Every structure is written in C-alpha cells, then in structure tokens.
C-alpha cells in the first residue's frame, strides 16, 4: 500500500473517502487504498449492527418502564419508544439481512435493558421479568405499548 494513501487516510478521513470515491468512479482501481477500504467497510458493518443492538436495548428499557411504571407514562416516553422503533426499522430497511439476527440481539440485550430500566425507575431488577416478555414483532410494532391496552397514552 502506498504510504501517501495511508497518511491521507489517517490525516483526514473525509478527504481520503472522497479520493477513494473519485478513483472508483474513474476506474483507477490500481490506485485504491484497498486495505483501508476493507477496514472502513468492516467498521461500517460493525457500527450498523451496534446501532441496532443499542436501539433495541433502549427500546426494551423504555417498554419495561412504560409497563412497570404506569404512573410515570408520558408523551415523552411514547415518543422515545417511537423514535427507537423508527430508527431500527430504517436500518432494517437499508439492511434487511440484519432482521434474522434480531432474536439474538434482543436476547443478548434484555438483561442490559432491565438494568437500565431499574436504574431509571429506581426499582429493583427483580421488579421486572427475568425473561423478556416481548416478542420481536411486539418490540418493533409501532402500535404496541405494553400495559395500556397495547396502545400509546395520549395525555
């Protein structure tokens, strides 16, 4: 790999990216910084997977808070739930191959969601179900709000 390309990659990723795009469009494949392109593509995939997992964790925590602290339900909580769902669905629209991994992401992140919900509500972790009470379909369903006849509160 050309040290000049590597230095440009490390100095300014935006200029490096623009340069790589221009080289690809021009068909100058022999001038591409292949190793860093591979690295960037791998990073992007990991970032997208992490975003889905993180949003699922936040969404489940809010669903738990919504269900187990009904006296605190607010439009803000419903909006946060909606925002998490919409962001997850946007990523899944762009990368439908992530959808089969959702069960795994939900299972892996449920305990973390319980910890966050317990911290936010100041309830013990034992106040929440030990096993995830929601299906992936419910988690992503824009109309599902647990404990409220499955619809959002509209104060």
Image: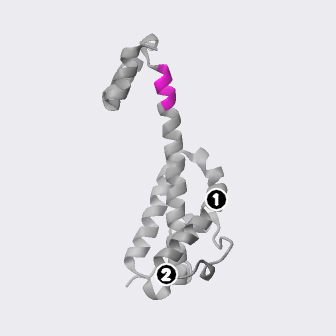
Q: For mark 1, give the secondary structure.
A: helix
Residue drawn at the location 50% of the way across and 46% of the way down: 48
Foreground of the two, 7 or 14? 7
Cα–Cα span, label 1 and label 2? 23 Å
- The front one of 8 and 104 is 8
**Who is closer to the viewer here, 103 or 112?**
112
Q: What mark, if any, has residue 108 been given in the picture?
A: 1
Element carrying mark 2: loop
Instruction: Residue at 53%, 42% (x, y): give it.
Output: 46
Q: Is residue 122 visible?
A: yes
Provide the residue designation for mark 2. 122
Magenta stretch bounds: 34-39
Q: Position of residue 115 (x, y in %)?
A: 55, 70
Badge 1 or badge 2: first in the primary sequence = 1
Percent x, y of residue 134: 63, 71
Kindly report the secondary structure that dominates the magenta region of the rendered protein.
Answer: helix
- Whether tag 1 and tag 2 are in contact, CB under 8 A, the answer is no
Q: Is residue 29 left or right of residue 127?
A: left
Whether 95 is among the magenta residues is: no
Front position among marks 1 and 2? 2
30 versus 122 height, above or below: above
Q: Within 10 angstroms of label 1, few (less than 14), some, or many (20 or more) residues?
A: few
Against 68, is 93 above or below? above
From this viewpoint, is residue 17 visible?
A: no
In this image, 135 relative to 25: left or right? right
Q: Position of residue 128 (x, y in %)?
A: 61, 79
Which residue is depicted at the point 50% across and 22% down? 35
């Amino acid at each position: 790999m050309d040290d000049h390309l590597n230095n440009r990659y490390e100095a300014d990723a935006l200029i490096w990216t623009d340069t790589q795009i221009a080289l690809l469009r021009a068909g100058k494949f022999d001038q591409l910084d292949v190793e860093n392109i591979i690295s960037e593509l791998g990073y992007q995939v990991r970032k997208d997977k992490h975003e889905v997992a993180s949003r699922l964790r936040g969404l489940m925590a809010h669903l738990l808070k919504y269900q187990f602290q009904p006296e605190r339900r607010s439009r803000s909580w419903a909006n946060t739930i909606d925002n998490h769902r919409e962001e997850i669905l946007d990523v899944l629209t762009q990368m439908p191959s992530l959808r089969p991994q959702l069960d795994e992401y939900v299972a892996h992140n449920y305990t973390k969601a319980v910890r966050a919900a317990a911290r936010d509500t100041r309830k013990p972790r034992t106040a929440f179900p030990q096993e995830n009470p929601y299906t992936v379909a419910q988690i992503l369903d824009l109309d599902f709000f647990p404990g409220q006849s499955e619809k959002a509160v509209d104060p």
